[in-house]
Image (spheres, rainbow, N blue to C red):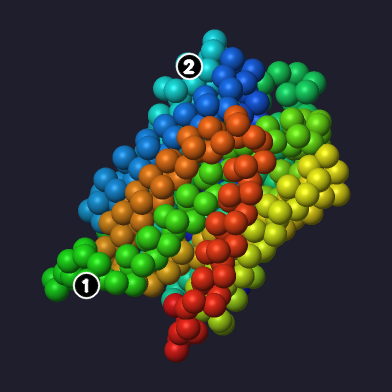
């Protein structure tokens, strides 16, 4: 853990994030199918995704503001506790419309996300920030490695309801892991406070805008990957669960690699390389969705490339003072979540017209952003 830059508090936080990821992973990849099971279609999936993104966007900035003024461990605990009842609400929903309150409550608990990011920034040393941040924020995916396969098996042999009940239990265990953590009071802000304006903080706002663009490119397609594999590829639920686990596994285990690469060659170029691999994964998914080999290749490529998703957060941490990290991450999350929230609705419309169109659009846009990051930005004099 120390080699990864993790202190005891970050170790407990990592364990908590992993258990939560396992609980979410049991049903996360099944979500579009559960919506269909309750009578919803592609438009309903897009609407719920949009509601989730808007709910997150509405709370992350106030949460970041609080993280700079309130003891951060308290914010973490409240964020975890608020979301524990949600899987049980999903389990007993009579139709897809009843999923809306649970979605609002679950994603509304994201007010604690800036506090998580600020705690990592507090605890990790500057030399290990890229690796530690990437590990903590991506370990959520490690819990999801087992989750999709187990969730698919449980759904096939028992029911959706059992999946949600087990998920709620795991959320409770995850919350208990936060109790041994020490207190994390907010750091005093600098008296010479710089205004939050693109002219005074150009690097910060550049990363915020770039992150919003990436969120849009991926948000157009990601809610429809499972339905696409089921409808265009005719793959079984168990097979789709395994493929989802493989993709998340590669995203999680490669996170430390991308963090170290970012320290060596710079965050923009590392991010560009990762997005190029993601674009190749989308192309592989289009090539032959009915082939397990091509679907597996797509999952591996997209998973390997998605290991870079924590790098913009590292860049944000390097462009602001630690005493204002909560506010900085709050606004960063506000922009990315709102951008991602707007994308699934047009994605759902395009998917209902032709299943392959959102994937083609995402692959093209991802490749363009990757090319710009690698070719359009000169190498920095020092890693950023």
Picture quarter containing residue 154?
A: top right
Q: Can you say which quadrant of the picture contains the N terminus? A: bottom right
In the visual, does 303 lie left or right of 66? right
Q: In terms of secondary structure, where does tag 2 sit?
A: helix
In the visual, does 288 lie left or right of 142? right
Q: Position of residue 278 (x, y in %)?
A: 64, 58
Residue at x 45%, y 89% (from the top left corner): 381
Furthest toward the top, the residue is 94
Which residue is label 2 attached to?
97
Furthest toward the front, the residue is 353
**Which is more toward the observer, 341 or 246?**
341
Up-down relation of residue 155 to residue 260 (above or below):
above
**Which is more toward the observer, 42 or 384?**
42
**Which is more toward the observer, 362 or 273?**
362
Residue at x 31%, y 54% (from the top left corner): 331
In the visual, does 114 lie left or right of 295? left
Label 2 Cα crowd, 10 Å radius (few <14 / some 14-19 / many 20+): some
Distance between the Cα atoms at labels 1 and 2? 45 Å
Residue 56 visible in the displayed image? yes
Q: Position of residue 242 (x, y in %)?
A: 78, 41
Q: Position of residue 194 (x, y in %)?
A: 18, 70
Up-down relation of residue 90 to residue 339 (above or below):
above
Q: In terms of secondary structure, where does tag 1 sit?
A: loop
Furthest toward the left, the residue is 191
Residue at x 58%, y 27% (from the top left corner): 42
Residue at x 37%, y 35% (from the top left corner): 55
**Which is more toward the observer, 297 or 217?**
217
Q: Can you say which quadrant of the picture contains the C terminus? A: bottom left
Label 1 Cα crowd, 10 Å radius (few <14 / some 14-19 / many 20+): few
Up-down relation of residue 196 to residue 262 (above or below):
above
What label sits on residue 168 in the rendered view?
none
Which residue is label 1 attached to?
200
């Amino acid at each position: 853990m120390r080699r990864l830059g993790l202190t005891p508090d970050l170790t407990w936080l990592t364990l908590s994030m992993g258990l939560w990821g396992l609980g979410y992973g049991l049903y996360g990849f099944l979500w579009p199918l559960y919506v269909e099971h309750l009578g919803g279609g592609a438009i309903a999936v897009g609407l719920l995704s949009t509601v989730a993104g808007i709910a997150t966007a509405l709370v992350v900035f106030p949460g970041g503001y609080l993280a700079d003024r309130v003891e951060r461990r308290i914010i973490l605990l409240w964020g975890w506790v608020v979301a524990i009842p949600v899987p049980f609400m999903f389990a007993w929903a009579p139709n897809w419309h009843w999923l809306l309150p649970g979605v609002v409550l679950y994603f509304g608990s994201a007010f604690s996300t800036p506090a998580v990011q600020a705690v990592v920034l507090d605890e990790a040393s500057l030399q290990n920030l890229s690796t530690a941040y990437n590990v903590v924020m991506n370990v959520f995916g490690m819990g999801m490695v087992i989750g999709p396969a187990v969730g698919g098996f449980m759904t096939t042999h028992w029911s959706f309801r059992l999946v949600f009940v087990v998920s709620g239990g795991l959320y409770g265990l995850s919350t208990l892991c936060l109790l041994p953590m020490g207190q994390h009071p907010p750091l005093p802000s600098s008296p010479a406070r710089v205004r939050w304006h693109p002219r005074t903080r150009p690097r910060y706002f550049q990363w915020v805008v770039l992150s919003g663009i990436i969120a849009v490119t991926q948000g157009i397609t990601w809610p429809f990957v499972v339905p696409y594999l089921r409808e265009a590829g005719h793959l079984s639920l168990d097979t789709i669960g395994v493929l989802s686990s493989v993709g998340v596994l590669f995203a999680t285990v490669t996170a430390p690699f991308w963090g170290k690469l970012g320290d060596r060659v710079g965050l923009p170029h590392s991010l560009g390389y990762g997005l190029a691999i993601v674009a190749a994964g989308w192309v592989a998914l289009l090539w032959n969705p009915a082939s397990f080999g091509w679907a597996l290749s797509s999952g591996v490529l997209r998973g390997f490339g998605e290991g870079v998703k924590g790098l913009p957060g590292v860049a944000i941490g390097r462009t602001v003072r630690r005493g204002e990290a909560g506010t900085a991450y709050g606004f960063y999350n506000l922009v990315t979540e709102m951008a991602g929230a707007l994308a699934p609705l047009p994605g759902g419309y395009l998917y209902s017209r032709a299943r392959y169109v959102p994937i083609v659009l995402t692959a093209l846009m991802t490749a363009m952003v990757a090319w710009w990051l690698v070719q359009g930005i000169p190498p920095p004099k020092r890693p950023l």
